[in-house]
Image (spheres, rainbow, N blue to C red):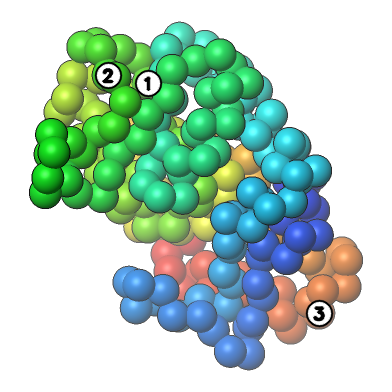
Amino acid sequence: MKREIARNLLEIGAVFLRPEEPFIWASGIKSPIYCDNRLILTAPHVRNTVEQAIADTVKAEYPEAEALFGTSTAGIAHAAIAAHILNMPMGYVRGSSKDHGRNNRIEGRLEPGQKVVVIEDLISTAGSAVEVAEALRDAGAQVLGIVSIFTYGMAKGLKRLEEAGVRNVSLTDFDTIVDEAFSQGRIDADGVNDLKKFIIENGR
């Protein structure tokens, strides 16, 4: 599955590889790779594969799950589609509470003690995913874990997840995408070295 999802993301141009001109993340980290999983939504053949893989992963890894909750905003659509496949309730968690209406942060009905899985598009430093898990816990949910489409496998993210007691299962990962990109001739050996150096420098 990891290899298939990696091929799909590369095929639709959702993975940008720029070892020579790094992207700057919101955290200030300079990265030679950028993964835009929003593009999955506009590629139906890949979307079908990814959403089915999310649903299958929820069933296999979190069989007790009773509802899916997406992260705002990138995880919302993926949570909705996977929940439809699974015939399961779905909601999402805002980045912050609304300043009007019911002042909700959690949208959708959440029952006390409900066993939920968080759906995230990617894991880098894991800050947003952990924050969502903690918001759901504070609201009375039992957070079984996370299913994400892609993970960088960065040490900071892994440490945050461990400290929060949150398990993440990703459909594909940094190493698989780099290996697949190299096998397709999208990057050369020097590019592979630059990409893997980035991960090492960020605590792999």
The outermost residue toward the front is 101
Q: Secondary structure at mark 3?
A: loop
- The residue singled out by tag 1 in the image is 116
Characterize the local packing of mark 1: few (<14), some (14-19) or many (20 or more) Cα atoms within 10 angstroms. Answer: many
- Residues tagged 2 and 1 counted as in contact (Cβ below 8 A): yes
Which residue corresponds to mark 3? 188
Which residue corresponds to the image point at 29% horizontal and 32% vertical from the top-left? Answer: 107
Callout in the foreground (2, 3): 2
The mark total stands at 3
Q: Which mark is residue 86?
A: none
Q: Give amino acid for label 2.
A: Leu
Q: Is residue 48 visible?
A: yes
Residue 168, given in percent of the width and then of the height, sits at: 46, 36
Most foreground residue, 187 or 9: 9
Closer to the N terminus: mark 2 or mark 3?
A: 2
In the rendering, at what x and y percent does residue 102 appear? 13, 34
Q: Quadrant of the N terminus?
A: top right
Furthest toward the bottom, the residue is 20
Image quadrant in which you'd find residue 161: top left
- Is 79 on the left or on the right of 195, as rendered? left
Asked whether disc 2 touches disc 3, contact meaning CB atoms under 8 Å apart, the reply is no
